[in-house]
Amino acid sequence: MEQEYSDKEQRQLVLQRLKEVFENPVQVEPFVSDDEQASVEIVSRADSPFEGVTSYSTLGVYQCENLLTADDKELNVEFLGICDSRNNWFGGLLSTCAFAMIKGKVRAHPFEVYKDIIPVYQPNIDMKHILLIPPFSLRHELGVIETDNRVITWLMLNPISENEYAFMQKNGYEKLLDVFVEQDIDVYDLYRRSVF
């Protein structure tokens, strides 16, 4: 018989995995939505996975229903992001994605796009939307956390422009990601120029 995990124990499992992957010490900061109807914690670590960038993850989004299953268990997610350490609003961006999920406005599935999230923070840059992708470029794999009733995994925020989104709509996400590799874009730079 599988062990049952309390909410507190599940939170501890997620936080422990983040500490291992981001490599201690991490900061944990609470964020509350403007209407005070939702809250989430953001875990961050500067100079991880390398100097000059900061890794971020939500902590608590896994409790939201996501309408996906894995091995007959609920498949729940946390949001992950890595960006240039000079961007001090990235934690807020993660929390905005989290609040949309917590309030039931969106679901978090691979290659889904959260539209017009970035202009809330930076209206005058090329990057507008968030494409959710499997995590990459960390020093260690986040993998999954399996408990008695759920499987917890991560999806990574990949900022894209309006033109990149239009290209993806027409050609599919694989083609867009191929272009990013060909162009060798700086995925950590929220201020990068659109490739189209």
Image: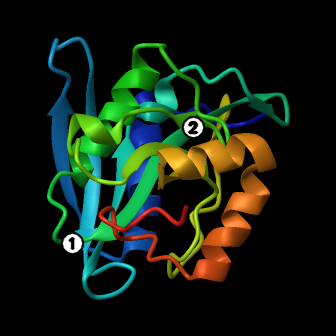
Above or below residue 5? Residue 141 is: below
Quadrant housing the N terminus = top right
Dot 2 surroundings within 10 Å: few (below 14), some, or many (20 or more)? many
Residue identifier under label 2: 113
| Residue plotted at (33% across, 62% down) | 190
Vertical placement of residue 22 versus 27, above or below: below
Left or right: residue 196 versus residue 61 is: right
Q: Identify the element where label 1 is drawn.
A: loop
Which tag, 1 or 2, sits closer to the chain's start? 1
| Count of numbered circles on the image | 2
- The three-letter code of the residue at mark 2 reads Val
Residue 85's disc is 1
Estimate how packed mark 1 is, as few (under 14), some (14 to 19) or many (20 or more) residues with alpha carbons within 10 Å.
Answer: some
Image position, residue 19 (x, y; %) = 36, 66
Mark pair 1, 2: CA separation: 24 Å
Q: Is residue 123 above or below residue 184?
A: above
**Where is the C terminus found, in terms of image quarters?**
bottom right
